[in-house]
Image (cartoon, rainbow, N blue to C red):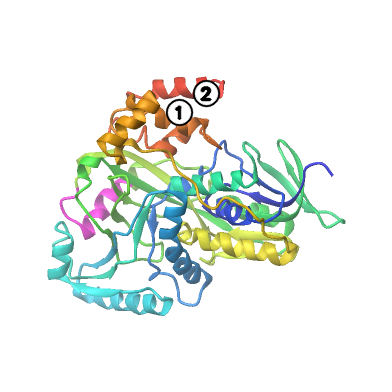
Amino acid sequence: MKDKYDVVIIGAGVSGCSAAYYLSRYKLKILLIEKESDVCEGTSKANSAIVHAGFDPTPGTLMAKLNIEGSRMMEALSKDLDFPYKKNGALVVSTNKESDYLLKELFERGNKNGVKDLRIVKRDELLRMEKNISDNATSALYAPSSAIMCPFSYNIAMAEVAFCNGVRFRFNTRVENINKQENGLFCIKCNTGTFYSSVVVNAAGVFADELHNMVSTNKMTIIPRKGEYMLLDKTAGNFVSHTVFPLPSAMGKGILVTPTVHGNVLLGPTAEDIEDKNDKGTTPEGLGLIKEKCFITMKNVPIDKVITSFAGLRAHDINHRFTIEETEEKGFIDCAGIESPGLTAAPAIGKMVTDIVLNRLNPREKLHYLKKREGIIKPSSLSKSEYKKLIKRNPDYGIIICKCNGISKGEIVDSITRVLGAKTLGGVKRRTTSLMGACQGGFCTSEIIKLLEYYNNEEVI
């Protein structure tokens, strides 16, 4: 049968690409379908970029289990897949002694979950850890295993390895209907054609409930929870060294202040349940709330250094849980409700999905498969002599296109011409950090468009 696969994965975010990464080690014919033009176009590109330690999820839940597993896997993966990762530690700050007991509750919850080296620090030590901590801060829960990472590079790296191991990708492909046929195959009708598969992995983010409800009588509801953020320029990069949280609420972990692996400072997110699953716009109210709430835990926040704002949608399950299981239609695997700590849990999610598929299809492992990859060369990480040798081999690395972040023509060309290369400005941005500097592409956009059009032989819209 034409267009028949063993596994079809729907969604090219961190969950879908993690499943593809681990499944690609087996003798399976796999297709990954994505409605956008690139990987990492949904929640995976607009989040806090934090590897959570695991003290927040309710003990005994799948969310807690996968948070801990994913957190422990991430550092090794950062080396295998060559993406930025830094263990910087997190602080959950109490700003009055009456709420200090909540830190003890988080401490106990974290210990039950298996988080290592948690401790509560008093104000004197807290001041030594963060010079700009709020004058009202009384104590904090310290989680040294918390880290920051680059979610774009991680998502893209898993996709590249999966592709090199034989996974096929279909972009700009939207699922219109799914049904199971009498022969046991799922028929997946899309705007670009019809595909058939023994197994379907539903990793469609905020749209996962819509796909689930096409095949299951046990209906699912996913609520898009909007989170707005503000990003500060790299000149504010030394303002904070740890990820600083307020005490959590029913709506999430609150407005955090955190460094990024790229040298910026990130503020946010807000948490607003909305109806429109495509609404990723920022609002004056949301950004105003960030400006107000970030001062709860920190003082002297350099708000004047904001260079951009953005919003992302979290796939909030009404029961606040991860759903990673087969429906009553065996072979249809939900990977749904993946909100925070979904980025942290992603590798563990991918392995869990893989185990479910292996139990159903029982494929053999490939004798040879790619496990690691090398990312785009970063001249800024090279010594002067190494950089000179690189320019001698390829002069494009000596031509700086993005002056704010020092990104060369060589890096941009690599981002376009490598496997699953960039097709859009956003794709180049996420692969290189060009267009992310203080000018937000004001000086480099036109040059990058020329390179995209030249190497992809098509107009950039």
What residue do we see at 71% from left, 43% from top?
176
Query: Which quadrant would residue 132 be assigned to in this image?
Result: bottom left
Q: Secondary structure at mark 2?
A: helix
Query: Which quadrant would residue 256 be assigned to in this image?
Result: bottom left
What residue do we see at 57% from left, 47% from top?
12
Report the front residue among 389 and 40: 389
Rendering coords of residue 179 (x, y %): 78, 52
**Is 294 one of the magenta-colored residues?**
yes
| Mark carried by residue 209 | none
Q: Is residue 136 visible?
A: no
Mark closer to the chain start, 2 or 1: 1
The residue indicated by pointer 2 is 455
What residue do we see at 49% from left, 47% from top?
373
Question: In this rendering, is residue 397 above or below 66?
Answer: above
Give neighbour class at mark 1: few <14, some 14-19, many 20+ (Cα, 10 Å): many
Magenta-drawn stretch, dominant element (helix, strand or loop): helix
- Amino acid type of disc 2? Tyr
**Is 289 one of the magenta-colored residues?**
yes
User: Does 153 sit left or right of 305 as displayed?
Assistant: right
Query: Which quadrant would residue 393 be assigned to in this image?
Result: top left
Rendering coords of residue 457 (x, y %): 56, 20
- Amino acid type of disc 1? Val
Report the front residue among 325 and 306: 325
What residue do we see at 61% from left, 43% from top?
34
Give the extent of the magenta segment.
287-301
Q: Secondary structure at mark 1?
A: helix
The residue indicated by pointer 1 is 413
The answer to whether the residues at label 2 and label 1 have Cβ atoms under 8 Å apart is yes
